[in-house]
């Protein structure tokens, strides 16, 4: 490719709307452009990277024996009603009607459509196991699209779905997919960790996420330094403390804490450390007959954070987790947020395992502007239930009892699920077993965020001059920068020959023939992250050489013109 015939689209200015480095660099390097919130066009440089990533994904999927299909983005609402997700999925599911008033949705994922295909096409247990996959655009009307394509509304996913007669077969495919995912992300140059994960709205009972390690990540993962344990913080169990609760020292008493709204403010006013103050939150439980939510109190040690996923897994807690409104709280307790506590609370009380070990603690008095001190479980509060409700913290013991937990930020680039029969039962996707009985197929599903994974690569591979692509997915492997090619026949002829020779060898090469100032050309090539940069200039040609630079290290060397092609080829990854 010649730059004179290409669309470089680089930007000098740092785009203000971009909050993370990958988004800034994708805009600056001319890879993507936003057309609506969370909806992007892929320009030629972005498209080249995307094509290479899709090829890697396809190769690894094909190796597992999965079969490629293409399902539509437009999905009939009937299928979603059959699975029961039409109402459950929430506003992320973009719904619309056609001119005949038929209801449709834009596919955020394809369990329903693929289960419909399977029930129609798979006739016999002998055809199993079968795994179908596609690389296709998804639409999720995300509440907060951000970080460019990292959390877009329209994005590219590879989704695969497997069908089985028994659990052992599902486990085998799950492992094959797990390994295929590890291969994909390794080939893309990502540093990643597979971690235990929650199954969310997809469902199922066993799942792993693949998390690319990066500070810009929206997820937190917890890993042990004493074992292979690693989990999304949503899933990581906080073990119950092994120490006993201390005995009550006194009866509780009321203290005025005017203007204190947070645990920290109350702790300061009371002269206590925050782990001696109870954090009391009120959330929505089930809706009762008159359409009002039951209010449930969740109590945590003042220095701990609520884990929302653990909370919604408790029976009777509304999913998604919703905090009670100020009006609801005031009507029910007579107090305002900031002065709440379990003493005298008339609803259900859920207490975190660590908070359960607190004694002689302070908590809100359910009277605005007041706290209670020297409060004790059992003595002062009798009806409460104990659960694991908090986020684990750096330094907690690993749930497997081996080692200490550490936290890191991650970008979820893929997830694999053992679904079981959730969809096949709801949609009657059955096959006959040996005795002729209809049994629902057991399913697995497996997603890769293809476009998000590209942003994750950039988060891990960039410097102050731009992107530093791993060679396997670089838009071009080699760039030839010709200095003042219109002033020197020799420069022009040498660059043209090298370009033709590299192309003849099947190398992806960008020939910068713009006759721009060298600074402009180098800036673009480095911003685009092309791994191998060749400079052809009059000065070095006089000495019979051209200059080679490795983008990653910035190290330059002169290579003899006579052996230029072989030398360059020897530097490329096979
Ligand atoms: P998240 O928790 O980040 O919202 P998810 O768990 O809902 O993602 P899955 O249903 O597991 O997503 O989808 C499979 C993959 O698709 C994810 O692992 C992620 O890489 C990618 N993905 C999901 N949502 C988005 C999005 N809004 N933009 C880009 N990629 C996404
Ligand atoms: Mg996921």
Image: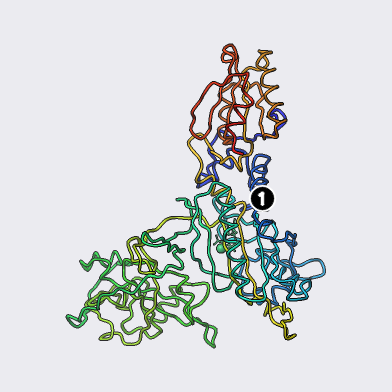
Q: Is residue 400 above or below residue 23?
A: below
Q: Is residue 164 above or below residue 36?
A: below
Q: How many marks?
A: 1
Residue 81: x %, y % from top left: 70, 76
Image quarter of the C terminus: top right
For the rendered model, the colour scheme is rainbow
Quadrant field for ligand 1: bottom right
Q: Quadrant of residue 381?
A: bottom left
Instruction: Depth check: give the residue in front, 497 or 175.
Output: 175
Q: Which residue is mark 1?
A: 54
Disc 1 secondary structure class: helix
Residue at point 65% right, 77% down? 84
Q: Quadrant of residue 469?
A: top right
Q: Residue furthest left?
A: 249
Residue at point 54% right, 88% down? 289
Residue at point 27% right, 71% down? 277
Residue 98: x %, y % from top left: 79, 66
Instruction: Depth check: give the residue in front, 460 or 540.
Output: 540
Q: Is residue 356 above or below residue 31?
A: below
Instruction: Depth check: give the residue in front, 565 or 96.
Output: 565
Image quarter of the N terminus: top right
Q: Residue furthest right?
A: 100
Task: State left or right for residue 90 relative to residue 213.
Answer: right
Q: Quadrant of residue 571?
A: top right
Residue 364: x %, y % from top left: 30, 75
């Amino acid at each position: 490719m010649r730059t004179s015939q290409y669309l470089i689209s680089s930007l000098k200015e740092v785009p203000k709307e971009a909050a993370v480095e990958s988004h800034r660099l994708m805009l600056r390097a001319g890879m993507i452009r936003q057309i609506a919130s969370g909806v992007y066009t892929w320009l030629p440089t972005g498209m080249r990277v995307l094509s290479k990533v899709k090829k890697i994904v396809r190769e690894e999927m094909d190796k597992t024996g999965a079969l490629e299909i293409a399902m539509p983005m437009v999905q009939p609402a009937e299928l979603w009603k059959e699975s029961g997700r039409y109402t459950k999925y929430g506003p992320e599911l973009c719904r619309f009607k056609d001119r005949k008033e038929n209801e449709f949705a834009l596919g955020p994922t394809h369990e329903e459509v693929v289960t419909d295909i399977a029930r129609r096409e798979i006739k016999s247990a002998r055809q199993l196991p079968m795994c179908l996959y596609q690389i296709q655009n998804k639409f999720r009307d995300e509440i907060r699209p951000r970080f460019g394509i990292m959390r877009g509304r329209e994005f590219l996913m590879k989704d695969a779905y497997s069908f089985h007669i028994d659990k052992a077969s599902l486990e085998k495919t799950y492992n094959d997919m797990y390994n295929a995912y590890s291969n994909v992300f390794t080939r893309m140059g990502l540093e990643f960790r597979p971690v235990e994960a929650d199954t969310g709205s997809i469902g199922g009972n066993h799942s792993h996420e693949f998390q690319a390690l990066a500070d810009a990540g929206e997820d937190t993962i917890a890993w042990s330094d004493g074992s292979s344990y690693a989990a999304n913080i949503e899933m990581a169990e906080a073990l119950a403390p092994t120490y006993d609760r201390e005995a009550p020292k006194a009866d509780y008493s009321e203290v005025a804490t005017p203007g204190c709204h947070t645990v920290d403010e109350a702790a300061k006013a009371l002269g206590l450390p925050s782990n001696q103050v109870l954090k009391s939150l009120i959330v929505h439980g089930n809706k009762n007959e008159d359409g009002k939510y039951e209010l449930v109190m969740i109590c945590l040690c003042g220095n701990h954070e609520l884990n929302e996923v653990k909370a919604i897994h408790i029976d009777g807690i509304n999913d998604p987790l919703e905090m009670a409104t100020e009006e609801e709280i005031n009507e029910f307790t007579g107090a305002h947020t900031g002065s709440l506590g379990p003493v005298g609370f008339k609803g259900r009380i859920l207490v975190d395992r660590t908070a359960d070990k607190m004694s002689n603690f302070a908590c809100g008095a359910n009277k605005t502007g007041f706290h209670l001190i020297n409060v004790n479980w059992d003595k002062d509060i009798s009806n409460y239930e104990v659960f694991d409700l908090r986020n684990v913290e750096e330094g907690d013991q690993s749930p497997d009892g081996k080692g200490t937990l550490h936290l890191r930020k991650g970008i979820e680039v893929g997830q694999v699920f053992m679904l079981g029969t959730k969809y096949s039962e709801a949609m009657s996707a059955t096959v006959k077993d040996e005795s002729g009985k209809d049994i629902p197929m057991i399913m697995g599903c497996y997603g890769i965020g293809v476009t998000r994974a590209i942003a994750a690569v950039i988060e891990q591979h960039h410097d102050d001059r731009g992107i530093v692509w791993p060679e396997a997915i670089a838009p071009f492997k080699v760039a030839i920068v010709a200095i003042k090619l219109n002033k020197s026949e020799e420069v022009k002829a040498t660059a043209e020959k090298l370009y033709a020779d590299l192309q003849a060898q099947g190398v992806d090469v960008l020939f910068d023939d713009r006759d721009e100032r060298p600074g402009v050309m180098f800036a673009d090539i480095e911003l685009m992250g092309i791994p191998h940069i060749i400079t052809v200039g009059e000065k070095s040609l006089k000495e019979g050489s051209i200059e080679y630079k490795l983008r990653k290290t910035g190290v330059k060397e002169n290579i003899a013109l006579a052996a230029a092609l072989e030398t360059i080829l020897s530097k490329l990854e096979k």
